[in-house]
Image (cartoon, helix red, strand yellow):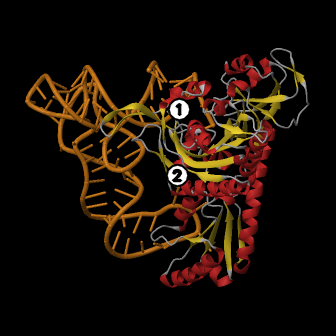
Amino acid sequence: MAESPITPRDKDFATWYQDVVLQGDMAEPAEIVKGCMVIKPNGYAVWEALQRELDTRFKATGHQNIYLPLLIPQSFLQKEAEHVEGFAPELAVVTVAGGKELEEPYVIRPTSETIVGHFFARWIQSYRDLPLLMNQWANVIRWELRTRMFLRTTEFLWQEGHTAHANHDEALVEVLRILDLYAEVAEDVMAMPVVKGAKSQSEKFAGALRSYSIEAMMQNGLALQAGTSHDLGQNFGKAFNVQFQTNEGRLDYVWQTSWGVSTRLIGGLIMTHSDDKGLVLPPKVAPRKAVIVPIFRKDEERSVVMEKASALAASLGAHLDTREGLSPGAKFFHWERQGVPVVFEIGPRDVAAGKMVIKRRDTGSKEIIPQEEAPSRLASTLEAMQKDLYARAQQRLQQNTVLANSIGEVEEILRDVSAEKGGGKFVMAHLKDDPANDARIKEFKASVRNIPMTDSFDGPGKCILTGEPVDRRVVIAKAY
RNA sequence: CGGGGCGUAGCGCAGCCUGGUAGCGCACCUGCCUUGGGCGCAGGGGGUCGGGCGUUCAAAUCGCCCCGCCCCGACCA
């Protein structure tokens, strides 16, 4: 029995994560470029699945895709004061092109609000041009000091939505519609439960009036911000002079929103469902939902088994593992690490009996079934697995969400939590939204994750730091 | 940028302290054999030892400089 290439979670969660990503053929560190990764076929196919799910929903809600330049004139970033301050430390800048020093350097986009501002100003004249609902699928670069594959890489893939509206109410509706859309994809497609909420003022996007997020809980109890939706108010409208004429003939600045999810979702997916045997993919995002591993000894068995297996693969839409020279055991381990939801085994005994073995990735359960039932059993197994993965993740989230009524209690619970050691919790406490309070939380390296949209606890209470009345508990946790 | 670790075959590593023939496991190639959870046996190919300079009869090994990667912290989708 060979040693598993995957470090167990309870030994070292961070190493486990790396092992799962590598062994699952999801990605590998690029090494030649600092903090960048190569997204490999299995990982990229998951991204494509997420893209499809998201893009369909964007289109259904009236958004159109566009593509903007990768390079942004440096002066653009400086037009919105908070924005430049927020992003300045992590910018990569092009200063030389065509062998000459540029008069004005270009920034490689960390996000496109500024360039969007510029073009919105050209495209919008009248309230009849509003709302303007755009989305871009793109790559961005943020020069982060600490990177982890999918969770935080120097370059990453994402979508950024950018919209302009005639008034604040409409913009807010958009912001929350997208937050709901993100939560739906996270929960229904990725089987990853999330908490929807508003970011605290100190955690909001640089240049926004208010940011909203979905926060997921990883298996080590750390929070992962899985998506954000920003109410930009008129900040960028004013900075880029995006004015329109109202139906009363008055000039006003547009109200903008922006929102995004990134390849980080894949990191969240991995840390939500995978186990010590490797990657576990929810059926809805799995590039290969089912694989058939044929088993035979002699040549005459081989031809019989392969014939049957091919026919079944075709009718099931399953991938048939025809690789030569590998034992069935080696193939089982391979597909297990790839996160394939269902693996069928078929050997001489099964062919003779008209049966096959169906095996589920998440539970590891094996069952012998009649071949004619395979299509319906595959469908029901995929459905059950999708549901069960969500239920397990939901249960973990609930079990690791605790109430605290003093700052000492919060600190006690979270102080020794780390990505490697685990033990993280979502600590629900009454806390006034004030940067000074966020700062106190940060003293023990936790943060206010968000202020939930719906209160599922005990309603109003007194701030654990200032005693001021607040209307609900906020989520405090250690985060990626 | 601070602390720690590391750079030797595609991958994972030993060798370095105490200088003297470039090693092991996996992977790869050929053949035989096997196949219901990582088959086995035999044979084989593959290296400017991260780079530079120095010490020395002789450097993977000792010294100096440089480069890169990973982990931990401060910054973040």
- The subunit carrying tag 2 is A
User: In x, y percent, where is residue A112?
Assistant: 57, 39
Q: Chain of mark 1?
A: A
N-terminal label among 2 and 1: 2
Residue B34, x across and y down, in percent: 48, 73
Q: Position of residue A369 (x, y in %)?
A: 72, 74
Disc 2 crowd, CA 10 A, few/some/many (<14, 14-19, 20+): many
Q: Which mark is residue A43?
A: none
- Other residues around mark 1 within 10 Å, as few (<14) / some (14–19) / many (≥20): some
State the image quarter where residue A340 is shown: bottom right
In the rendering, at what x and y percent does residue A156 appear?
A: 53, 43
Mark 2 or mark 1: which is in front?
1
Q: CA distance from mark 2 to mark 1?
A: 42 Å
Q: Residue A472 lies in what quarter of the image?
A: top right
Which residue in the rendered view is the most extreme toward the top? A466
Left-right relation of A470 to A179: right
Q: Which residue is mark 2?
A: A23
Which residue in the structure is indicated by mark 1? A76
Residue A167, above or below B25: above
Foreground pick, A307 / A265: A265
Q: Residue at x 72, y 19 (%)?
A: A435
On screen, residue A132 above or below A379: above
Look at label 1 and name its amino acid. Phe
In this image, A237 relative to A467: left or right?
left
Q: Is residue B73 left or right of residue A189?
A: left
Secondary structure at badge 2 equals helix
Name which residue type carries label 2: Gln
Residue A223 position by quadrant: top right
Asked whether residue A5 is in view, the answer is no
The residue at 63%/46% (across/down) is: A265
Viewer-side residue, A225 vs A3: A225
